[in-house]
Image (spheres, coloured by chain):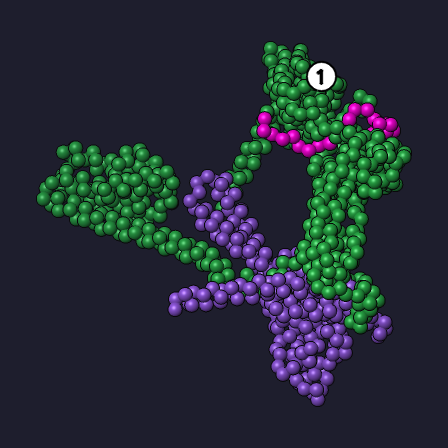
Amino acid sequence: MLRSLGTALAVCIALLVCSATAAAQRISMAASANRVAVGEPFAVEIRVDIADDEPDSLELPDFGQLEVLSRSQARPMSFSLSFGSGGQQAQVKKEIIYNFTLRAPSRGAYNISPAVMMLGKKRYATQAINIVAAGDVPQGQGAPSMGGLSGQDFDPDERPARRVAPPSGLDGATYDPTMFLRTVVDKKTAYVGEQVTVTVYLYLHGQLPDNPNITREPTLEGFWSQDLMAIHGGLPPVRHDANGRPFNAYVIRRFAAFPLRPGKLEIGAPSVELSAGGSIFDLMNGAPQALRRNGVKVGIDVLPLPAQPTAGAPTYTGTLAMDATLEPSEAKVGDGVTLKVSMKGSGNLRALSLPTPKLPGLETLSPEVDDEVTADGDTIGGQRVVRWLMLPREAGTRTIPAFAVDVLDPATGKFTTVRTQPLTLTITGQSVAAPAATAASASAVPDQNAARFGPVRAESALRRTSPELRTRGWFWPSVGAAPLLVLLLSGLRLLRRAQAKRRAGNRGLQALREVDERLDKAAQAAKAGDARAALGLLGSAIKGALEARLKEPVGGLTMSALETHLRARGMEDKLTGRVIGQLGALESARFDPTAQGAVQVTRAMEGVRALIAELSRFRPKPAPAARRTRIDDAHEEGRT
Amino acid sequence: MNGRRISGALLAIAVTLCAWSARAESLSDVFTRGNTAFARGEYAEAVRAYETLIDSGIDDPDVSFNLASAYGAQGKYGQAIRYFQRALRRAPGDEAARAGLKQSRAALGERQAQAQGEAIVVDRPPLTEALFSGLSSDALATSLLVAIWLATGLFLALPSLKAEMLRLGVGIASALLLVVAIASALGVGAKADWGQEGARAVILRDGTAVREGPDEGARRAAELFEGDLVRVLAKRGGYARVLVRSDLTGYVRSEDVGEI
């Protein structure tokens, strides 16, 4: 595990090094998005690092058919001091930054050629960027791709990050070179009930140091609103130029507002406070000061609904689908029947109320309403389910008439009528008295808190008592089996390792026995006058002793390889020298008749015995992995 | 002879099917009857209908919710607390039941304060309960089972993995899953009231006497109020042996205490 962590750390360091190397490049080009909608503005930034020299020439890219909406150039400079062993060092970093706002006029693929810079005799070029334009920008929605720069890599399947960029212009916002508020609405004219998407941007020249404190929320008198940020979460900032100055535009509020009445309605001016400073200079200058800014109010002209086709029917602005059911469709007098109407669509469904059906002989109680608000992109919609409990009082057949809603399509300004199907209820049994008589029954004497409880649930799965999972017989054995399995397999693994170790130990003992046998055979050969064989057996005994200590074969190694390997296994230089020297001397003596006298052989035998005794005290280090594998292979070959 | 046997068998099957369908329909009807009674303000009738369902073996959170609401509407807040808690035990995420429980406790506290001048309303669950309040016992048990087997699988797969980064990732994932399994096991334990005796219950009547023995003549050891929480250790002869505090056990009449 530690090794794995070490590897992870190494990879992180390597990545940091790579990113640092990448940061050192002289010229770069990046686009805010590789996939854009037709007509949607997006940004391209070219950054030239001129830390050392001014470029001799700089060739900006050819944008081809892409429309250039705006361009700006900045030459920021940073100055840093570092203190090291070599004393104080000052570093000046200069950059040239070109910002372009572009737009694709039609669908298709666009290519932005590389930007090229000449510095001395060296040529630096960026990569080309491919832009794919598809679909039109939805009416009234902010361009989603004006945000952070996505880099130069082109991935056709990549979806642009959700960003909401302000459109060009300032919408009457009070400009300030440091910070200002801007309220953007997607439409200035809307029908009653039509969604108006409102976005409040905080324009800041620089980075937002802290969460801004909104001291006054935009007032919404005459609107029903739904917070979009609560549904989608916060939005990242967007680079945007205002009056030729680069700003970061932060979305601080975004909501859907539905006008409830016709006329001129206003979205109130917000106020924001931002604590500034916090640097060492602020400490010297006193407490950091807060920046406060006020936004401006935005007016919406709300149009009255046109004449509706169905007199008396409820009206709705948006899209709508309706369905009605009756459960059960046959009931006895006094039994409850549930009438359920489900409505789905886009728009302000919570403002849509249906009339309570009134039929003779059928008492209908107050409805139970369930709402589910969803947002498809920025379009608010969802589902509203209305349930009425109906109590039949008289036998007979009743037809519950169809519910009809006049739905206005704001795009066309025309109504269509959405209807449910009529429903038939068959009631059997004898008629009962009016509910007023039963309501006063003795059992219905709730105390004053009774109104706090209810309504009750109209539907139930009527599930039966079932034992909890934890009480089932198989549950705890199933849970316990997992750690037991781990213990069992870990135990087996340890057992196998111990066996392998024992086998290795046995191999060592056997090797030592072989060494002794070889020494005895060498003594016998010396007695018999076969000095050459005796010397060979002595050399073999030394190698056998080495193999017994190292637990690996060394027979195939050359003298120099053996010397290196013995050192790698932790043998001291002195002992290594003796081993190599003794082996070399024995090898030479085998082919030198003058060294094969009885005295020399006896002396060699004593030397070898002393060396083997010393080798028995040697404690080798573990073999390197690669070497061990080779040795294991050699063992396998030996076995086969 | 054979024809008679077949006819008999068919008749028996038909009777069984009819009885089964009548029963299924009857339960649904009882539920609707309870709802209708509730809508009319006939809360006692609604309680009777919902209790019939509970006695028939129904343990549905919606039925418990409706029963609790009917008891609450009658001013029987002890019972309301009991059934709202039962609804929450089956559906821990039921916000309406949670609100109803809070409402019942508040109403009970209000009434007790009016009667006695002061009242203590325990509104906060114990820490272990609060930690796992949004999850059901079954959800935690499933999470435990899945997490422990995934952790085991990943741990056992570790030695066979060659790539160091993959080993690292799998090792971390295995450790995280183990943490999830341990947390789930703690949750299951908390839901099952491990380490605590008896079953959770609510006192249903103000002034319930806790006696030293299962007899009306036994000495009163304490007096409990409606909504007080106790643990039922055993039931015997119309009395329930309850644990009131760690240092106080006694006997209360069975009808004065309701198990959650």
Q: Quadrant of residue A207?
A: top right
Q: For residue B87, say whether it is visible.
A: no
Q: Which residue does the numbered mark 1 point to in the structure image?
A: A67
- For the residue pair B56 and A407, the one nearer the viewer reads as A407
Q: Nearer the viewer, residue A582 or A558?
A: A558
Quarter residue A148 falls in: top right
Q: Residue at x 84, y 30 (%)?
A: A189
Q: Quadrant of the rendered structure where residue A194 is?
A: top right
Q: Colour of chain A?
A: green
Kind of element beneath mark 1 = strand
Query: As rendered, which of B190 and A588 lies closer to the eye?
Result: B190
B150 or B95, which is in the foreground?
A: B95
| Colour chain B is painted in | purple
How far across and how far down the image is residue B7, in percent? 45, 65
The image shows residue A113 at horizontal and vertical percentages of: 62, 15
Query: Which segment is the magenta one?
Result: A156-179
What residue type is disc 1 on?
A: Glu
